[in-house]
Image (spheres, rainbow, N blue to C red):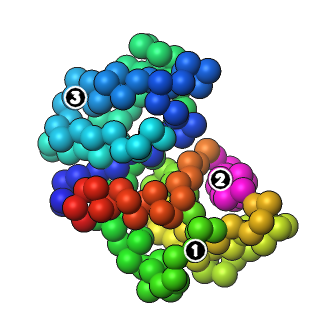
C-alpha cells in the first residue's frame, strides 16, 4: 500500500464523449504506457489507483494527461495523493465525525497549494459549507444544502479542484484493501 497513489481526475465520466472522457481501457492503458503498474480505475468518475514504480506520481500523471489530451481531448486537472494520505484523511475525519453523513465531501487540489484558509470550522460559502479537516492537497467539508464544495474550495484556492463524496472515498479504501 505504501507506493500506491490515487489520481482524482476532474470532470471525468468514463466513456462520455461530451466531456472528452476516455473509456476505462483507454484511461488504464494511458497509465500503463506511462510506466504505472497495478492500475485500477475505480468507479466511473476518474478516480484511479496506481503504483508509479519509482517515478514521480505527479510527473507520471502529467504523461497520462498528455496522452488523454492527444487521444480523446481530455485536458482537465488530476490531483494525486498517496493512498496512505487518503487513508489518513478518512481516519482523521472519522475521529471528528464518527457517524455516516452524506453531506461530507473530500476535495482534492495541487498538494503544493497553500491551504492555511482551510481551518476546521471555517465557513467557505454563504450557505454554510464548512471545513471539517484539511491537509496538503485536500480539504474535507460538510456541505450545507445548496452548497457546492468544489466551487467553494476553488474560490479559496484561486485554482481548480475536484470533489468526491466521502462514501466514494471510503469505498475506494475498501477496494484497495487499505
Q: In this view, does 171 lie to the left or right of 78?
A: left
Q: Is residue 125 left or right of residue 67?
A: right
Q: Mark 2 = which residue?
A: 150
Query: What residue range appears in magenta?
Result: 148-159
Q: Which of 63 and 18 is in front in this view?
A: 18
Residue at x-position 51% and y-position 82%: 99
Q: Mark 1 = which residue?
A: 101
Q: Mark 3 = which residue?
A: 32
Image quadrant holding the C terminus, namely bottom left
Residue 150 highlighted magenta (yes or no): yes
Indicate the quadrant where residue 35 lies: top left
Percent of width and height locating residue 144: 74, 69
- The reply to whether the C-beta atoms of the residues labelled 2 and 3 are less than 8 Å apart is no
Q: Is residue 139 left or right of residue 41?
A: right
- The reply to whether the C-beta atoms of the residues labelled 2 and 1 are less than 8 Å apart is no
Residue 115 visible in rendering: no
Residues under labels 2 and 1: Cα distance? 18 Å
Secondary structure state at the residue bearing disc 1? loop
Percent of width and height locating residue 109: 52, 52
Who comes first in sequence, dot 2 or dot 1?
Answer: 1
Residues under labels 2 and 3: Cα distance? 29 Å
Residue at x-position 42% and y-position 71%: 89
Residue at x-position 83% and y-position 67%: 127
Amino acid at each position: 500500500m505504501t507506493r500506491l497513489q490515487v489520481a482524482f481526475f476532474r470532470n471525468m465520466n468514463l466513456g462520455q464523449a461530451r466531456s472528452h472522457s476516455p473509456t476505462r481501457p483507454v484511461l488504464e492503458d494511458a497509465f500503463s504506457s506511462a510506466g504505472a503498474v497495478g492500475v485500477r480505475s475505480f468507479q466511473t468518475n476518474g478516480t484511479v489507483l496506481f503504483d508509479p514504480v519509482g517515478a514521480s506520481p505527479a510527473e507520471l500523471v502529467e504523461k497520462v494527461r498528455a496522452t488523454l489530451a492527444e487521444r480523446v481531448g481530455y485536458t482537465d486537472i488530476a490531483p494525486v495523493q498517496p493512498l496512505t494520505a487518503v487513508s489518513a484523511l478518512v481516519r482523521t475525519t472519522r475521529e471528528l465525525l464518527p457517524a455516516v453523513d452524506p453531506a461530507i465531501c473530500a476535495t482534492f487540489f495541487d498538494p503544493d497549494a497553500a491551504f492555511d484558509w482551510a481551518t476546521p470550522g471555517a465557513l467557505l460559502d454563504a450557505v454554510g459549507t464548512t471545513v471539517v479537516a484539511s491537509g496538503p492537497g485536500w480539504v474535507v467539508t460538510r456541505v450545507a444544502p445548496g452548497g457546492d464544495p468544489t466551487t467553494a474550495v476553488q474560490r479559496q484556492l484561486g485554482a481548480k479542484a475536484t470533489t468526491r463524496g466521502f462514501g466514494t472515498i471510503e469505498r475506494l479504501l475498501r477496494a484497495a484493501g487499505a
